Image: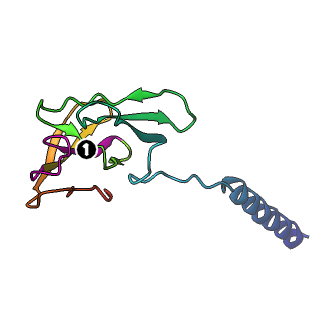
């Protein structure tokens, strides 16, 4: 009788330990975001090419992915530089930094141009020149930003 009672207690403790173990295991997995995740904003550019003397006015804007919180990125370039209307910007650094191209003057067919790649934060701060490129050809040659990873 003693062995039977001892076997029952051992079996009960074994069953209880299995139930406790299963209760402590969660059946959900929490995915962690990596640093490479894209932000949930949409970048777009508005270019007005209807101004006189072949002048193009371009602006970058962002809006949340749900269509809310539309805002212009206030880019304050030096007076001799303009946003290059023929190239698009790219978001990097998790959607916190804009990479874009600028040029030294508006497009002409007569003389070489200097192009630059700049970066800035989405609020327009931290404006930095990344590289410059001087076209050695006359005519329509330009630097186009292909991507930023």
Quarter-wise, where is residue 104 in the image?
A: top left
**Colour scheme of this structure image?**
rainbow
The quarter of the image holding the C terminus is: bottom left
Residue closest to the eye, 126 or 87 = 87
Relative to residue 124, is residue 50 drawn left or right?
A: right
What residue did someone put label 1 on? Answer: 84
Q: Main secondary structure of the magenta part?
A: loop
Q: Quadrant of residue 83?
A: top left
Q: Which residue is drawn at 25% across and 44% down?
A: 84
Side of 20 relative to 105 (left or right): right
Q: Where is residue 62 in the image (x, y as percent from the top left)?
A: 42, 35
Pick the front one: 92 or 110: 110
Residue name at image x 15 percent, y 50 percent: 115
The question of residue 104 being in magenta is answered with yes
Q: Give the range drawn in magenta.
A: 96-113
For disc 1, the neighbor class at 10 Å (few under 14, some 14 to 19, many from 20) is many
In the image, residue 79 sits, relative to residue 1, either above or below, namely: above
20 displayed left or right of 79: right
Nearest the eye: 105 or 13: 105
Spot occupied by residue 121 in the image (x, y as percentages of width and height): 28, 36
- Which residue is drawn at the image coordinates 31% and 59% (left, top)? 146
The residue nearer to you, when weighing 50 against 27, is 50
| Residue sticking out furthest to the bottom | 3
Place of residue 76 in the rendered image (x, y in percent of width and height, measured from the top left) = 20, 29
Secondary structure of the residue carrying numbered label 1: loop
Q: In which quarter of the image is the N terminus?
A: bottom right
Q: Position of residue 131 (x, y in %)?
A: 13, 52
Q: Does the magenta stretch include residue 19?
A: no
Number of residue marks: 1
Q: Residue furthest right?
A: 1
* Residue lying at 27% horizontally and 30% vertically, measured from the top left: 52
């Amino acid at each position: 009788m003693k062995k039977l009672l001892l076997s029952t207690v051992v079996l009960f403790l074994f069953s209880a330990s299995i139930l406790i173990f299963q209760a402590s295991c969660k059946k959900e997995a929490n995915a962690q975001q990596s640093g490479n995740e894209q932000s949930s904003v949409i970048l777009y550019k508005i270019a007005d090419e209807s101004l006189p003397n072949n002048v193009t006015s371009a602006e970058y804007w962002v809006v949340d992915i749900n269509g809310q919180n539309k805002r212009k990125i206030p880019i304050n370039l030096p007076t001799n530089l303009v946003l290059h209307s023929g190239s698009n910007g790219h978001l990097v650094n998790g959607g916190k930094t804009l990479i874009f191209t600028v040029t030294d003057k508006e497009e002409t067919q007569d003389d070489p141009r200097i192009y630059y790649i700049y970066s800035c934060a989405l609020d327009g701060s931290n404006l930095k020149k990344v590289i410059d490129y001087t076209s050695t050809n006359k005519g329509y040659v330009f630097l186009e930003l292909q991507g930023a990873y």
